[in-house]
Amino acid sequence: MTNFKLRAPSKYNQILCDRNLKLIHSSTVEFETAEVLIAIAHKNQVQYLNRALKSALNQTLVKMNIARIVVLDDNSDIIWPSETDILLHHPSVTFLSAECGSPARTRNLLLDWADTQNNVQWVARLDADDELFSTDSLEALWKSAKKTNSKAAIGSNKLRKNGKILSEDNIADPNELKHHLELAKLIEKFASGRQKRELPSCNLILRTNLGIRYPNIRSAEDHWLVSKLLMLHSSDIAICPYPIYAIYSLDGDDTKKNKSNETWLDQRNRLAYMTRTWGTLLTTKRHILGIGMEGTVWLQHNQVVKEFYPWAISDAEVQEIKVLLSPDKDIPIPKVTWQKYGGLWQYQTAYNGNTMPGEKIAKELIVQYLTKLYQAGVSTLNIKRDNLIITNNGELQYIDIGKDIKPLTTSYFRDMCARLYSIGILGNKDEELVRRKSWRRQDDSLKALSGFEQFYREILTLLHHQCVKSFTNPELTATLKNNSITLLIKACGQDVEILTEQVTHIVTQLSYPVTFNKKVLLIDPHQGTFLRQYADANLTSVIQLAKKLKDDGLIDTVLVAPSDSKTISTTYKKWFAQSNCIETHTTNNAPLFPQIWGFDQITTPYVLQCDLDVLIGRRSWKHDYIADMLYACESEDVLAVGFNIPKSQPSFTPYHGEPGEFAPEVRFGLLDLNRIQNQLPINNSQSANRFTLTWHRALQAAMTIKGLRAVRGGDARTYYVHPRNEHKHLSELTIARDLISQGKEPTEQHEQFDWIPGKHWKYEHRHEAIVFLLKGRYTEHSLLQRSLDSLQSQTNQNFGIILIDDASGTNHNWCYPMLLDKLESKTTLVRHCHNAGRMPNFLLAIKEICQDPQTLIAVLDQDDCLMQTNIVDQLFDAKQNGADFIQMPMFRPNKPINLYHPDYTNSRKAAGANVWSHLRVFTKALFEQVPEDYFKRIDTSTWFDTVTDYLTMLPMSELAKNPVYLDSGYAYWHLRKYYGQDERDREDKLIKELLSKPSLSKIINNI
């Protein structure tokens, strides 16, 4: 067997994760009071790092303990040379490691870290491939900033290319840098290639806690930061042309790579446009509120205006944002008015003087914010403090309206929650938790965020309270008891195989909405031959099973007819005025004594007596058939009421019957015991020491003489069918029992007492375009009700349902039609008597019951539920677009932060790549492309009895022509039961086996 792994291999992917900052070692105590920090960002540049470190260690400020050094390694995959290791262990050096993901993120972490150091007031930048020019370079730049009380200072640099220092110096000229328009011209010149000298952006010392950070762009991020500083804070920036601060290397890997593609030039051209725009606004005295990577924001006549750069947003993106932020939505984003001015998109919104959030944000504000966005289907992706405000009404709002506002997906929502939690609850820096490349797994990364897993579970629980509200089992027992009537079920020794099933069927079908004073099982102990015998007698087993039924509370009393001659003769004397007979059965071998003795044990005025083998149909569970039958007994001349039979018309048939026309219904009927007792004794002749008539025929003869009646008729909603003994071996009888129980008999059965066998006993076919398949066994009623409620809540009700219960037993599943309620008319309900197994149930539902090859089958486990009310609409849209294999996001409360985004490219080699996950939807035609043998074990040719999610979805994902993953938020609530380690090990073994099977796509393509 191929060694397929059960977990997909790790990949170097962009994920949402923290910076995984680790302190390797700290500088020594003599540098604790240093106020200047030389910050060196490093990744795989060890060949240059030694040079940079030596130049830093030689600085006069370091030698005076006024400056110390921090080296941050961004997840380098190198072996550190001994020389470098020695330098890193200098007393002035702190060595950190982290996973930052980009140069900008690395530099920002250094700035964040510097802000946390008690005595550090200044951060001097030094790239790992650069070096400080002279021993006093840092001291001079620091003094120029300090003496002018500036926020930052910018120095000059030399250039090194191919190991040689070039003659042209990049001198920081205050006449260019301190004036807005001159600065814009400088940037435009070097961006256009008309000038080699660039903005001296690497020669920078910054005061701590300024809050300014590098944008996470691939190139020119340093130019962008320095340009922003100079534009917005020109009066607070010191310019130090001399002495030269650093030697900037043009040989660095990032520099070479950037210059070799369009990114380098493109970013510089964009920077030129941005600085020109900023310069113009500042020159015209506009009140700039913010400048970013999308546009510039300023205040104009108490209106906030944001103007986008030409490349920043398209017409289509604006239209999408307009739809997402439509005025009718209650979302925590300001209402704006859009216009296109001079070819550039702008929006305006009222300025209300709101406040910025502090280090932390109140949890209730975060929850309210996330709730509104989730319900509106909107994502705000650029979560950071600068983009959030607290309104005068105390609401948290997102103000960065632009391309980072997207339609909601589960991934976007989880990102929003995690970033807000990191910032607002934990008080982390804005960049602590962002998307960056890492070898870590996304789920593991978020689990490491302290408390987030519980927070996220709480949010989803709040948003989908219908999935987690306190579910109690529905009230499915009778609330009323009629104390005047007893249910008497008659059985004998040959009924051992059907006893439990039939008693359960009869009791559950008859005990709602009103139940009985008592439920009694009467056993005929006869062990000889039987009239119309269909099985061998096993009285001992029947009595044992009867005792268990009583212990289980299904019946109240078990009566076994006595066999002593005294009781027999006494009973016959009472009923027939003859005591000289002790045979319990008639001349035709029909039971006599056991039944009339049983009637004598009943203490209620009425008894509803029936044979064990009757099948009871309920077209409506609201029908109080007991009240109807008792009403029919109100006439003083009525001794018995027959139970109704299946009718072709739903109307009520008036109760009718002339004196002696009908015998009391021996198979199933209501008896007025007091009136019958008043007629005793009645005539019954003997032959060969046996009575010739059964009790009901003898009573019929007496009723003819005395003008008494047995009546038939009633409401068609409740009825019975009697299988003849010669038909009880037929396989379709179990299907018939289920269908009759549901009140779904075929027309061939109408107006018939006896069961009519034939091919007409089959489950209703489904022809809808979408069919939900709900399979399960022993599903808690409350969970099934939740699942059905989620279907009932769908705004589009154009779907069918196949609900299969795999032999939970009648005592459990009798109530399923009631649980279905309004869904019953669109449901094919299958309740097996014997466990069929998962794959046979798939085949029954999809190959036999579903008829249209293009029907979409949506698998919904009975203990799960849908989380959105528009699932059906989404499936119809996907079907219209040709999808033949569909998945939608599931939420697992026990694993709340896990997402299961499928990958259809090579799922078998990626341990299934989540193609097994809920919601699972596919066409009947696609399912039928998979040979049935594919669902069987390799060695035994038996069905896989578990892991059928992998088993069915994996081959279909490989065969699908148009697989799609629909993600507009969570669609499926899935709480998997806990399985022991042995069962999990077994499942793992089975998954390995099916993963090792050849791909069906390859097999079919080779045919």
Image: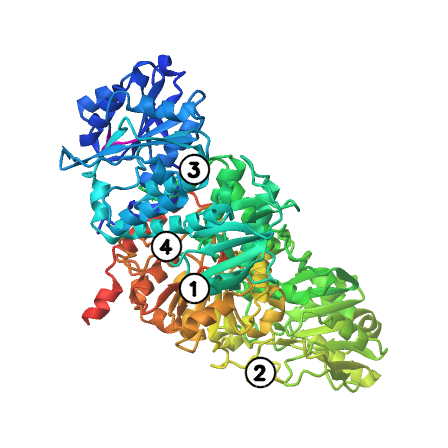
Q: CA distance from mark 3 to mark 4?
A: 54 Å
Asked if the residues shown at circle 3 and circle 4 are in contact, with their CB atoms under 8 angstroms apart, the answer is: no
Lower position in the chain sequence, tag 3 or tag 4: 3
Q: Residue at x 32, y 23 (%)?
A: 140
Residue 881 image offset from top left, x and y in percent: 40, 73
Magenta part of the protein: which range? 126-131
Asked if one can make out residue 544 in the rendered structure from this viewpoint, the answer is no
Lower position in the chain sequence, tag 3 or tag 1: 3
Residue on which the image places disc 2 = 749
Residue 343 circle label = 1
Q: Amino acid at mark 2?
A: Gln
Lower position in the chain sequence, tag 1 or tag 4: 1
Quadrant of the rendered image containing residue 703: bottom right
Q: Residues within 10 Å of mark 1 (few under 14, many from 20)?
A: few
Residue on which the image places disc 4 = 914
Judge from the rendering whether residue 823 lies leftward or rightward of residue 981; answer left or right: right
Q: Residues within 10 Å of mark 4 (few under 14, many from 20)?
A: many
Lower position in the chain sequence, tag 2 or tag 1: 1
Residue 234 circle label = 3
Q: CA distance from mark 2 to mark 3?
A: 94 Å
Q: Amino acid at mark 3?
A: Ser
Q: Nearer the viewer, mark 2 or mark 4?
A: 4
Q: Amino acid at mark 1?
A: Gly
Residue 632 image offset from top left, x and y in percent: 79, 77
At numbered mark 4, what does the secondary structure look like: helix, strand or loop? loop
